[in-house]
Image: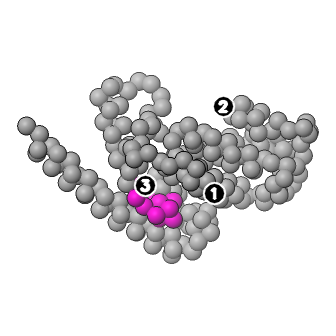
């Protein structure tokens, strides 16, 4: 997958393509391979958790790395690759969501169910849980959703998130508190709805 992506992204007229490299003049292909290998999974998961379908996340992730490896892109400062890709990913995600309205339900398979080996009942239950999670996340404002996803689902610390989103740690902490409140409230409403449906069944 990585090699196919790199081949597509680096297929330019300049076979020796020495542009779009970080400070230090590392060869583009070597740097590009490292960039994709280290950050592709994180960027793809972020795009999914920000509301894109799996297929849209594939396209969006390619766009993100296409920007990073473009000969027109200024050199990315060493050590800031993740922050750069993160910012591009959010912009690409917003463009994707503007172009294609998201459906009311999320029928993609969850991130951890891409592999085979799950029983039908387990798959169905976890599929349903995934759809509910995505519905809850969709109700959050984007700035709160980003902080919540990065902290709760990606395991980043508040200072790490603050660096990525270019905001004070206190602001990130406030967004996390608000995100937890929204999440807990949504879960409570969802549980009440499920209980009402269950009790209404004959």
Q: Quadrant of residue 62?
A: top right
Query: What segment is highlighted magenta in the picture?
Result: 137-148
In the figure, 125 relative to 90: above or below? above
Q: In front here: 164 or 44?
A: 44
Q: Secondary structure at mark 3?
A: helix
Residue position marked by numbered label 2 in the rendering: 1
Q: Residue at x 21, y 51 (%)?
A: 193
Residue position marked by numbered label 3 in the rendering: 138
Q: Position of residue 187 (x, y in %)?
A: 29, 55
Q: Position of residue 15 (x, y in %)?
A: 91, 36
Q: Residue at x 39, y 44 (%)?
A: 105
Q: Position of residue 113 (x, y in %)?
A: 44, 33
Asked if residue 86 lies left or right of residue 115, the reply is right
Structural crowding at the residue carrying mark 1, measured as other residues with C-alpha within 10 Å and reported as few (<14), some (14–19) or many (≥20): some
Residue position marked by numbered label 1 in the rendering: 91
**Magenta span contains residue 143:** yes
Q: Residue at x 7, y 37 (%)?
A: 202
- CA distance separating discs 3 and 1: 17 Å
Q: Secondary structure at mark 2?
A: loop
Q: State which mark lies toward you, 1 or 2.
A: 1
Q: Is residue 162 visible?
A: yes
């Amino acid at each position: 997958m990585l090699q196919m992506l790199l081949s597509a992204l680096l297929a330019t007229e300049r076979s020796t393509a020495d542009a779009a490299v970080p400070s230090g003049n590392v060869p583009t292909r070597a740097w590009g391979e490292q960039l994709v290998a280290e950050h592709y999974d994180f960027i793809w998961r972020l795009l999914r958790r920000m509301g894109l379908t799996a297929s849209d996340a594939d396209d969006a992730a390619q766009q993100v790395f296409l920007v990073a490896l473009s000969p027109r892109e200024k050199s990315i400062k060493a050590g800031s690759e993740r922050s750069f890709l993160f910012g591009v990913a959010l912009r690409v995600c917003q463009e994707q969501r503007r172009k294609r309205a998201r459906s009311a339900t999320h029928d993609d398979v969850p991130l951890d169910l891409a592999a085979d080996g799950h029983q039908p009942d387990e798959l169905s239950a976890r599929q349903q849980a995934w759809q509910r999670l995505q519905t809850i996340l969709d109700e959050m404002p984007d700035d709160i959703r980003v902080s919540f996803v990065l902290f709760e689902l990606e395991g980043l610390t508040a200072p790490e998130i603050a660096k990525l989103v270019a905001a004070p740690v206190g602001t990130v902490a406030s967004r996390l508190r608000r995100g937890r409140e929204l999440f807990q409230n949504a879960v409570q409403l969802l549980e009440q709805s499920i209980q009402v449906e269950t009790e209404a069944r004959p």
